[in-house]
Image (spheres, helix red, strand yellow):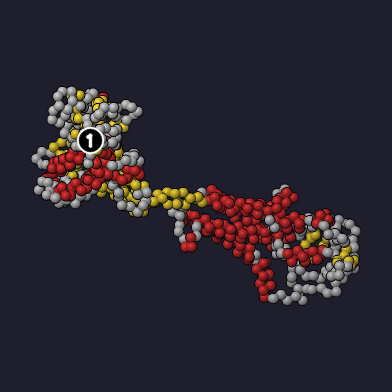
Amino acid sequence: MDPSWPYNNYQLATENKPQPTVGVRDGDGLLNQYSPYQYQQPYVDTPESIKPGKKDRFLQWAGDLWLFEALASIISLISLAGIVITLVLHADRPLPRWPFSITINALVSTLATISRSSLLVSVTAALGQRTWARLSKGQNPLSDLETYGGAGRGPWGSLVLLWSTKMGDFASLGAVVIILSLAMDPFIQQITSFESAPQPMGQSNVSARIIFETGVNPLGSISPKAFSQTPAAFISLLTQGLYFDGNLSDAFSRNALQLHPTSSGGNVSFDTAETLAVCSECANLTSYLPPPEHYDGPPKKGYSNNSWRWMLPNEVTTHWTMFGDRSTLVIAMNTSFNPMVLDNSGRLVIMNVSAIIPGWTIDNSKKPPVGTGHPGAAQECSLYWCVNKYDSKMTGGVLTETLNSSFSEATKEPGVPFYSLKPPGSNASFYKENSQLYGDYPTGWINGTFLINTESHKLISNYVAGRLNVAAVSLNYYQQGAALTDNDVALRFYSKASWEGDNPTPKFDMQGIIDAVAQGMTTVVRTADGTANSTAVDAIVPVPGIETALEVFVRVRWVWIILPVVLQVASIVFVWTTVASSKSQGLPDWKSSPIAILFFGMRLSNHVRHEGIEKWSEMVTLAKDYWPEIQMKRRR
């Protein structure tokens, strides 16, 4: 070994062991043996004889200053800061829409990978430098080169270092950082979560009616065009109600009879709506219907001794009906009588309807067949004006209204052609310039009051009553469920009759039809009808609502960022403490350089017994006997 080497001088502490003869294989594989004191190199390179290029000099300068490691630490910190800034900017906000469909997860994952990779660059370099510090004073075996050097090559080497040192060396901090860095990406992925939440996207409204004057001209009488305008609106939804066969409690099915507020397809929550409406109520009268009367006297005009009559106590009757070919009555509906059971006190009734379904049996053994009347079924229903208070919302374009309360007590306003409904605690408010034409409202504001024009009420009442005052007879002599009539309304109601087995007494329930009719009429009431009276349009009050759509929001769980932050702090402490320690000892900045390890080995080759040693285990065992020391000589 040339003692004139001006930069590093290597000495081996061999614990007074005899110096062995060592050898170095040449290019032909021959083993040349020399005494470590007799071996002389024919030529020795010195710093004065080597002229590094600009690139190498720059790399040496940057390496001595740890510039690359500093840059790696800065990049790692900036990447982690980028993650934090990104999450702060988007926490509890809608998922961002970036060009090329880049997601926030992709950006965070990329920054996490950059941060972790850059962090490991500086940590592995510092672990390499710790290896040389370990061998610098001749107090540790050469085998530590394997233990400490391996720690910078991955988690397994780091675990070996921790096991070997029992975490009693400062290099253990770097090993812990490398091991825990495996969890850095999963932890950062756990920081973000996503959930759907409503986001405002516009406004919508649902209508409510305050004053009803359909078909009335500005003078207060029925418009000449009333019957060409008003029934057109009612016919449409009244007919839909008659033939509605869905479930009114199902929002999607009920939607066919309801208002259709405009929206962009989002969800809308409306303010509470108070509006004029049409309500319904029904009662079963079958228990009040006596058995039928049989006429057995001499034949008279309109009936014979094969005639029967069903009559309720309030004189709602089928009249005498003959059993015969296409003359056997199967349903009779009457809108001219007051109800028996329903209490309509204080109500402004649009229509009362009573229906009777006779019970029949037929004896086909006789010619012609003979029919016998049996107890039938009966029901009564009412349609009346009311003020309903709804909680309204729209989901997926389907309006759902939940009835909160209903008020139906009506009074006649003195001196004006209006009925009024004044629900207690009503917040309804409507301004009309000629408000005194509607009652005692001198300020123009009509508050807490809902008005129905008397003529409009008659118009609607007469129309609906006329539609439901119907009857139908049986096909042939008699066949259950088979009616013969040109009146579609009678056929529709008769379709609600049913029979069980051989029991001739039918079951009958028209509640569903009447409820659907009331719903359809309510929708018409809440819709502008375009008649001559402007109040028919401007007495509709829009009830506002905020339209929202489900949007994905970014949620941040900051606790998961603790590990990445701790690793950043630990890596900075470890790296720059190592740099300071290395500089104070005057050690060369070899770090994890493979060429430095190669040169170090070449300089040791003349002092280590290595003849025939090829196995790793043998090398490690032998390395434990050598305790190298790096002594620094400062350049002049």
Can you say whether 353 is above or below 69 in the image? above
Residue wearing tag 1: 326
Residue farthest along the front direction in this orientation: 367
Q: Please identify the quadrant where the C terminus is shown.
A: bottom right
In the rendered structure, which amino acid carries the disc numbered 1? Arg
Q: Nearer the viewer, residue 386 or 88?
A: 386
Residue 60 x/y as whole percent: 68, 69
Q: Is residue 517 above or below residue 25?
A: above
Q: Circle 1 sits in a helix, a strand or a loop, which is it?
A: loop
Q: Nearer the viewer, residue 85 or 617?
A: 617
Q: Does residue 215 appear to the left or right of 87 in the view shown?
A: left
In the image, taking residue 98 as reference, residue 62 lies left or right, namely right
Q: Is residue 473 left or right of residue 251?
A: left
Q: Residue at x 35, y 44 (%)?
A: 252
Which is more toward the observer, 332 or 442?
332
Q: Residue at x 58, y 58 (%)?
A: 113
